[in-house]
Image (tube, coloured by chain):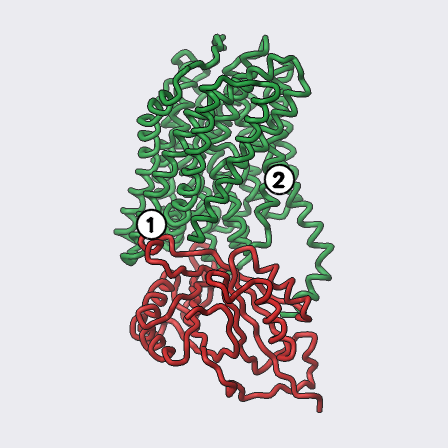
Chain colours: A green, B red
Amino acid sequence: MNIIKEKFKEGLSVVLPIAVLVLVLNFTIIPLEKALLIRFILGVILMLLGLPIFLLGVDIGVTQIGNLTGHTLARSNKFLFILLAGIIMGFIISLAEPGLHVLSGQVDFVSAGQISRTSILLTTALGIGILLAIAALRIVYNIALDKLLFILYGIIFILAIFASSEFLAISFDAAAATTGAMTVPFFLAIAAGIAAMKKDTQAAERDSFGLVGVTATGAVLAVLIMSILGKSSIDVAELEYTLPHTDSIIGPFIVQIPLVLKDVFLSILPILAIFLVFQKISFHLEKKAFRAILKGLIYTLIGLILLLVGVNAGFLDVGSIVGYELASMDNAPLLLIIGFIIGFLTILAEPSVHVLTHQIEDITSGSVRRVLVLAALTIGVGLSISLSMLRIIIPKIQFWHYIIPGYLLVLILTRFTPKLFVGIAFDAGTVASGLMATTFILSFAQGAAGAVEGANVLVDAFGIVAMVTLVPLLTVQVLGLIFKMKSRERSLEKYEGYEGL
Amino acid sequence: MKDMKDFELIVTVVDFGLGSKVIKTARESGISGGTIFLGTGTVDNRLLEILSLDHVRKEIAIMVTESSVAYEALDKLNEKFHFDKPNHGIAFIIPVSEVYGTRDSVSETIIKKDRGDENTMYKAIFTIVDRGKGENVMDAAKSAGAKGGTIINARGSGIHETEILFSMPIEPEKEVVMILAKNEIVDNISSAIREELKIDEPGMGIMFVLDVNKTYGLNE
């Protein structure tokens, strides 16, 4: 029972902190209604059950499929095969990502139908597909990650000059929305699968990361290009913000179940399809391994359903009410501090973050401990929420004031950071903006924006996910720099270590 | 002529995250250092096997040291990590015939060769096969009476195996399977693996068996 206990412990350490925070707030400054509190606790219990099952499923199902797919791509030894397979896989997987559907609906709404739901869905998915192929080709052709990122972000900067501020925010959100709970482990494993075959161990270590980061730029590029070509602007629709209210305890859970079921099945089907097709043409797995992977997919499915129902029915309303109440208090430092703590704790509860940190430990044979990466990430996201709260309170601060200098700094850092950490940072950034960020943090920000006069719920909320993506890029790279300096100091000591075998 | 010194290789297989602690504890007993790598262990549990959850992440820590230090250190390790309790990992000692590069072995040190006559009850079977086939090795071994084993991811190539895909040199991925078994059943296990995996045909992998001097944590 060892492994189940281990995963359950992990789930506990993930969900408990944020539950405690909400309870503490409840008994001190923001008393919640009884029904809401009970729903929150039910949500926590569902997450506690769902997270371990999900993580187990990813371990024995999704990760294995991704690894094998990576192998197959590289083994083919054909440029055209990687290109086509990459585009097709990226396209269908992102089409199935629930987050992207939500986002494209929102964009359709704010652009008053100028940009239709379908067009943004298709362009983003195509962008992801093309960049997935490029990211895979980068690994097999040994093209340096920082160079590729430099080119991609260079193009993004140029496009950003022509695009409106709202679309800049939406484009980064599209990237965050497509890298969800299913796509991240799958993409990560593809990269690891290709890189693991390399003869040069250090190159294999480095190249295992960065694929998610590169792929996500596909969404940014696609949305930016579309907004410029379509010359569309956004009539900022002033939304009346209404606080969510319901007295029912069980009701919201029952409403959520069919919605979640649809989302989860939709996102797991393409991966199952890819698995079955490749099993026929390339994997030829033994029966036992084949069954284990299928079981893994079933666990992922069950885990994800529990998780999402818990989050959507139990967490969301609490998030926005806490945000609203806090912002109404007119106490800026308090809002910034609580914002930091919430960012810090929600990232701990993010399932994809745990997938990534495990991957990092596996691939570096444990020399980059996950606690360190986790610390860099949580502090980074905490900071990004504080900064976003500041932007909501002070309307003069524009979204691009953060994002342009931020990314410039990121690109400058890539020149100095060890290559391994560049890849990890870009992956971590996209991974951080997963399930929890787009639900709990987003609703917290919406609540806060709803309470502040002059803040626009929709526009201000759009940028926050992009911020969650940006700041970890900086903190993880700084971690890399520290790591580099430390290992230089230690190199003498290390030499002695080898002496003892 | 200096003293005749015997050297031993201490191998411990522990839960993920404990490897560094093992080496730290070993250092207190006078071992100068060690190497850690990752592996996958199996759990002997029917229910978990049905659920396909019978795999655990493990760390393997190996250390070379003098015999006089080795046995004492292993006792200390056992006190601290309780290998003798079920699911607390295993530890064993493999006699080493030549050692270079450690602090204790100056070039004049002559190591007594032809060892393995110590009365051992166990042997360690190592099988190196292509990635993905470790599972089959484990199944074959279990059918012949083995209790479990550890799979280690590795890479390596035979004479014809290095190739270049796109612009990256590829080394085939391998799995190393380490199985500890009582002397009486070692032959059964090794022949089961040889038969099942066709080890004797070229390019199908290699297998070797080492003597083990002392073991902790094998529950019979």
Q: Position of residue A443 (x, y in %)?
A: 50, 21
* In this view, A391 is above or below A410: above
* In this view, A172 is above or below B163: above
Helix, strand or loop at label 1? It is helix
Q: Relative to residue A300, is residue A323 drawn left or right? A: right
Residue displayed at 37% across by 41% down: A300
* In this view, A262 is above or below A7: above
Question: Residues at badges 1 and 2 in contact (C-beta under 8 Å)?
Answer: no
Helix, strand or loop at label 2? It is helix
**Amino acid type, mark 2:** Ala
Displayed quadrant of residue A27: top right
Chain for numbered disc 1: A
Residue displayed at 49% across by 44% down: A9
User: What residue does disc 2 label?
Assistant: A376
Name which of mark 1 and mark 2 comes first in the sequence.
1
User: What residue does disc 1 label?
Assistant: A293
